[in-house]
Each structure stands twice: as structure tokens, then as C-alpha cells.
Image (cartoon, coloured by chain):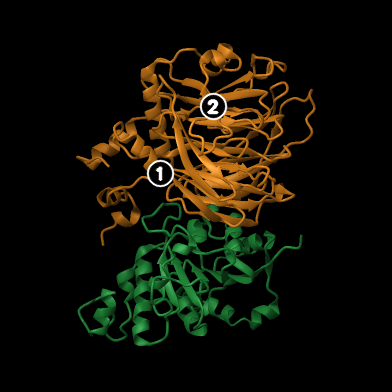
Amino acid sequence: MQLEEKIASGDESNPCISKSTRLPRKRFYRARAHSNPLSDSHFPVPISPHHVEYSVHYPHFFPSSDSPPDSKKIEFADVGCGFGGLLISLATLFPETLMIGMELRDKVTEYVKERILALRVANPGQYQNVSVVRTNSMKYIPNYFEKSQLSKMFFLFPDPHFKEKNHRRRVISPFLLDEYAYAIRAGGIIYTITDVEELGDWMKSCLENHPLFAALTEEELEADPVVKLLSSATEEGQKVSRNGGQTFKAVFRRIVPSV
Amino acid sequence: MEGDDSLLTTEDNNKEVVELEVAPALISVHPAHHSVAVAVGCELRVFNLREGCPVTLGAESGEVCHHKDSIRAIRYGAKGNVFVSAGDDKLVKIWTTDSWRCMYSVSTEKKVSAVAISDNGQFVCYADKFGVVWVVELDEFNENQALVQKKGSPLLAHYCSIITSLEFSPDGQFIITADRDFKIRVTMFPKKPLDGAHEIQSYCLGHTEFVSCLAFVYNVDCPHGYLVSGSGDSTVRLWDFTSGLLLNTCDVGSEVGRLMANGTESNYFAITDLCATCDGSSICVAVQGLPGILLLTCNLLAKTLSILKVVSINGEDFIPTSIGTSLTSNFLWMVMGVSNLPGFDSSSLARVRIISGLTNCNSESGDQNHNILEDQQVPGGETLLQQLQGSLSIDKDVFSAAAEAVKTSMRNLLIKKQYSSEKREFRKRGRNDRKAKR
């Protein structure tokens, strides 16, 4: 909040914020690419989805801290949102939908927070529907989302964990898909993309083998405006394009299995 | 945390001390009260209540099939013909309770922390300290069969969290798993469990510390029943497990703290174990640091739990490490014990007590007919106690050391260590990106 005031008052002294664009400068938020997903880090975790602080994340939609029973809920979750590229693009594409980024690295989360705050100031009325939280989504998805709450879940360029002994740390795994299937409603969509072919095969096969997910058809992929954003909207995706690399997508729908 | 004079000294001290892990004694009772089993360290001790004699495991087959390291979980199946034991030796042993032969042995990758048997006795599930729950299918057992080695299939997982308790719902439709990260997960138990249990029914979220134990409470009027859970946050909670809704929270910690105001300096009253009486009217709770048992009344219609009273054992500072009942009898069996106790001649101890008459407790009548059985009154008498305890008399000093040791080991296992920021920075000193000068 202090930073927002600084920006608004035209305080030029904060070096982390670019003077020209008013957006945070990435080089002050450099972080290692990896963060240990097994460590029990020191960030607060909501005890249950009812304890998620909507009024802190989306003050425009939730002016007071009481939320009435039929209020809006978060529908899109970007797991491992990195520097926030996808969320920023989605925010204007779906202005009435609440969305959240989940990121493990604290410096990167700070960057995204400040980016969103700066965008909110520079574009009144916009970007109020997007926020970020520092958390370990592999452990705490059920703490943030109720059953069948989400309509879209994103896993863009996740850590490949190349060594076989570390495969269990991958964010897409048969066990974790159970939890994602719990949080995503029937008909909701899970989007994954990577530039590592082996990981792409792995994610696709985990999804194919899971009884609660079915692949989207080519026509459905063409028709979905979000699919194009997977490779173009994120910093990782742009880097891959620049280097002329290939990407591997797996986009699946959450289904209700026939008994 | 105590102050560290020098961070370096503490680190070195930690490396030098290699202690055997203390393991609490466990007790499990046959559903029709045919036998009772106590596990202390790697020893499994069984007493046949119907014939009033001790059981020698694997006697008929002549096989030696004892556990080689601490047993962490034991269980009878709902029908009573199967018994499971598992723990730190990474072996799950499945026994037939007729002849107490070991039918199956399952080798596991990680140490096992919990076991459960499906209602029809067809599947045995076991959970490890890494958060994975495995399942094995039991085939028709032929009496003359030699020991069969089996391999478990993964059923479900709590990501990187120690699973502390595993239970099947009374109708066998769901499997409930509780973990160290405050979560309780209710998953549909499928027709083909070997393919995995993928449909999560609900999460019961509300505890603010590790969940240590689970039990179901139900009666004739409410056969579907509700879930009861105990936790390191010193509460016992009642849940509608189909929806995940928290129905009631019972603040055991403040009540026990109030009662023990003169005694202890700590206010740490984690729930060790709990079980429901067979008529669904009460919950018996074992609390760390509290001698005796705390009784809660359970009103299934109103969906509430309330504290009734503490039943204490006269003359003994008896803090149970494990409790159990059968479906048919009126007895609450309790064991207090530990293995690998440092600094004492006999490094393991177990003491068994029974409270009878706990059913038909209600809050209107203050006095019930509950009764703490003396050693001679126990079914099987001193023969049983000799078999299950290993000896008849227990040293008082050993008792209090045991209670402390169990408390510390549970805390170390299940509560994540909090480091000060200096200590955390110090621990990162070997990391590559820290070493390089900017």
C-alpha cells in the first residue's frame, strides 16, 4: 500500500520502479529459477477456502471484509505464475472474472504484486480482478479453492525436474491431478505448456491416464482464445519464441466419468 | 526456542547425537473381543481372550516373522479375521487371526505411518511418511500356503506430508486420510482400488495443527455417522465428512489446561488418540500430558460434542499412548508405553489398563458405573498383563520419563521446526548461489 501511495504522489526516489512506465523493474526482483517445493516455507496459509481474504486481493469487488454468501469466487488459477504475464493478459480478456496467480518464490511474488498495483493505478477500473499470492500450490490448493470452484487452471512452463528421482516433485503428477480435478468444475479446463519435450510427454500422459480428464479436440483448441496466449503472453513463452524453440501443449477438460 | 550461544556449536551437537527414535506403544482390540494386541517397539504381543492364553505368533508354521524395527500401526479388520502390523522396518505384515500365521508380507519403500483394512476385508491400505497411500488386495487364503510376498499399488497421496491416520467410513464408501499439514481428505473408495482412488469427495479443513487421529461415531438412528478428529491444536472436531462441513469444535486444551493449572508449566495438550464407544454416545480421548482419559459426550442429532469429565487412574500417572474398544464389549482398553527409552535398563515399557462401563454415559446423570479394573479383574488376569506388558510391575520413574519421551518425539515428528531468521540464513550458507560473490 505504501508503494501505491508513492506512485500516486509521484515519488521518484524508489529505484525499483521505473520512472517512465511506473512499473516495477525486473532486475530488482531477480530470483533463482528454483524454489524447493518440499520446504515448509514461512508464508501464511488460509485454514480453508472461506478464510481466503477476498477484500485484500480484490478491494474493488469486496469493499468490506464480509462476503455475502452468493458473492463472486476466484475462477482462474495460474499455478506458478512467474512474473505474471499470462494473468495480465487474461485480466482484460475476462474483466468480470476473478483470477489469482500462485507463486512459490517470494521476490517474484512481490514483483507481480507491485506490477498489479501499478497497473491498477495507471488504468482506473481495470486489473481489479487479478491478484497474486505466495504459496505452495502443490500442498495448499484445497485451502484456497472449494470443490468445483475453478473454471480454468494454468500450468505454464513448470519446472521439469529432470532427474528421475525428482519426478515426484513435478507439479503435474497422477496424484496431484486428483486435487486439481477436485478444484476444477466439470467442463472446466486445465492448460499446460512446456518447451521441454520429455515433460510435455509426461504431462500429456498423466492427463490421458487420469479418469477425470479428457483431451480437447483440435476444433475446440482453435476456438479457445486462451490457447494462443499460452505461448505468447508469458515471459518464458516469449523467450522460447525468440530462441526459435518448440512448445508442447496439453489442454484437457475436467469430465464426470460415466459410472 | 532456547537461545543459541553460537549457531555453530548447536549444529555440531545435532550431528553427534544419534538417537534411536522413541516409539509409543499401541493397542488394538478384536471387534468381537476374541483377542487383544499390543505393539511395543518391534514386539507384537497378542493375548487370546476367548481361551485366556497368550499367543505365540507364527507358532504353527514355525516361521519366524517378527518385525525388525519399531511397529507404528496395528489394526484388526472389521470382520476380525485379519490383522495388520507395519512400521519402521518397511514391512507390512498381514496375519490371519485364527492361527496367527503371517499370510502376506508387503515390502514398502518408506516407513509406514498408518494402516487400515476395508470393511469387506479384501483390501489392506497403508500410508507412508512421504504422504502416499498404498493398497494390496487379499486373495482367498489357503491354510497350507507359505508366506506370500505382495506389492502395493499407489492409491492416493497427500503431497509430501506425513499421513497420521487412515480410516474407512462405516459404509465402506470412503477412505479418510489425515496428515501433518492440518488436512483431512475424504476420497471415494472405488470398486477397483488397484487403479487408484481419484475422486475426492471433500476436505475437512479447520484444524490449525497436525491431525493425529480419526474415528467414526454412529448409532442405529444415525448409521451414516460423523467423523471425529483429534489434533495437535488441542481440539477434537466433529465433521460431516460427505460435505466437509465442520459441525462442532471441542476445545480440549483449555479444559485440560484449567484442570492442570497447578501441575504443568506447558499448555501443549495435543490429542494422542481417540475412539468412540460402541453405542455412539461418547468419545474417549487420550491427551498428551493428561493422566487418564477425557470423556466427551456426543449428541448425533444435535451434532455436538461436549466435555463430560476426566477419568483418572488412581495411584498411577497413567498417560495413555493408545486406546481401543471392540464392538461388542463395554471395555475401553488403554496402553501406556514406549520403546527405545534412553537411559534406562529396560528400554521398553508397557502398562495396560481397562476402564469398563463407559457406554450409556449421558450428561444428566453425573455418576456413571464406570470402573477402572484392578489387575486381577482384567480378563485373563495377570497372565494377560504379563504377556502384553512384558512384566507385572513398572517403575514409577520409568513412567514419567516415558511420558516425556513420547511427547517430545511426537512433537519433533509432526510439528515443523521454526528457525529464527539468523538461523535460517546460516543454514543456507552452503547453497551455491550464496557462495558466489555478487
Residue A40 coordinates in the image, percent (x, y): 41, 52
Q: What residue sits 71% from the left and 47% below the top? A: B194
> What residue is disc 1 on?
B415
Picture quadrant where residue B325 is located? top right
Q: Which mark is residue B282?
A: none
Q: Colour of chain A?
A: green
The alpha-carbon separation of the residues under discs 2 and 1 comes to: 39 Å
Q: Colour of chain B?
A: orange
Out of B44 and B5, give the one closest to the viewer.
Answer: B44
| Closer to the eye: label 2 or 1 | 2
Out of B189 and B144, give the one closest to the viewer.
Answer: B189
Q: What residue sits 32% from the left and 77% below the top? A: A24
Q: Report the amino acid beneath label 2.
A: Asn
In the displayed structure image, the side of residue A42 where residue B278 appears, left or right: right
> What residue is disc 2 on?
B369
Residue B399 coordinates in the image, percent (x, y): 40, 22
